[in-house]
Amino acid sequence: AKGGLELRKKIILASKVAGYSKGRGYLVEKRRETLGTEMGDASSFATHLSKVQIFEAVDASLKRLQTTYLDLYQLHWPERYTPVFGELSYKRASERADAVTIEEQVAAIGELVKSGKVRYWGLSNENAFGVTKFVHACEKLGVPLPVSIQNDFAFVDRRFEQDGTAEACAPHNVGANGIGLLAYGALAGGTLSGKYADAAGTAQVETSRHAKFPDFQPRYHANSTLELSAEFAKVAKKYGLKPAQLALAWAAAKEYMGSVIIAATTMQQLKENVAAFDVSIPEECATELEKLYLNYERPYFANVGRMGRNNP
């Protein structure tokens, strides 16, 4: 390839492998098609984080990307049953006896790291319980700990820092630099950009993904999110900041943040997003944002100004 090994060293290349799903057999089919192995009937496949499927997925990615190694490889969502992607509660009846054990997953990753096909690995859409189990399995098997966790995180969605996951990933509990958060959805699918609250952005709204695909990730465009985002945009304007830049800068300032994932439709959006990481949020602005958040996310603390009983 043009540039060769020297150019490859300058690129941080990441990929993922899908967790359990009965409806994504086409992923297994595509991997085997890439590798030239027997495929069978895709409708009969379920994706699993088994050693076989993890190895197939890595080899297929390497072949498609025309490289010999991945800098970061992540387990896209949990193999075991656990409430993800908006499910509100844990249901014991949904537990699966056929779930691949965390130890098998960790052992497979360990082999890939040892072989040089994967340099570092991480988790995604995981919770505090899962992080703890993976860390214990790594310690037991002598496998390097995950370095990252890619979870949904934004001003309007702070579960990561409230449900114990940030604590599970902290250096105090896992050593070294901890497990860094790779935040996706930091703009809540564009809602925190303020364009939905700005009448001048009508044309932009009509071409947005929430307009084109209203059933895709509706959590980003729910009424409460729209209301909070509109108030967020007012705070940004008050301090002379663009809402999108404030949202990204707010996320980037978190002590557990490894990196904030950005996306853009236009070059102008990309430039604004990149510039956000040079923004320093005034203390008064940060305080105002916390009060705003409490009004919407924890209404029973709206007039208290804090979450806990005794500690501000």
Image: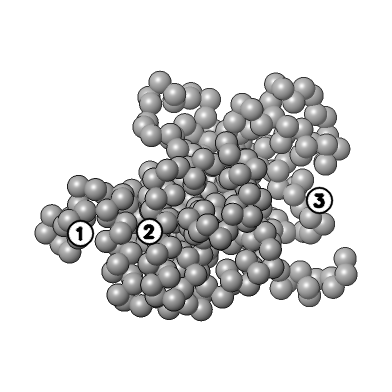
- Secondary element under disc 1, as helix, strand or loop, is loop
Residue pointed to by mark 2: 231
For marks 1 and 3, the one nearer the N-term is 3
Residue 163 x/y as whole percent: 33, 48
Residue 2 seen in this snapshot: yes
What's the CA distance linking mark 1 and mark 2?
Answer: 19 Å
Q: Which residue is mark 1?
A: 306
Q: Position of residue 62 (x, y in %)?
A: 76, 52
Name the quadrant containing residue 56.
Answer: top right
| Mark 3 surroundings: few (<14), some (14-19) or many (≥20) residues within 10 A | some
Report the amino acid beneath label 1: Arg
Please report whichever mark, 1 or 2, sits nearer to the chain's N-terminal start.
2
Of circles 1 and 2, the one toward us is 2
Spatial distance from mark 1 to mark 3, Cα to Cα? 52 Å
Label for residue 202? none
> Looking at the picture, does residue 23 appear above or below residue 104?
above
Q: Residue at x 39, y 75 (%)?
A: 239
Residue type marked 3: Lys
Q: How many marks?
A: 3
Residue 280 image offset from top left, x and y in percent: 43, 78
Residue named by callout 3: 63
Q: Nearer the viewer, mark 3 or mark 2?
A: 2
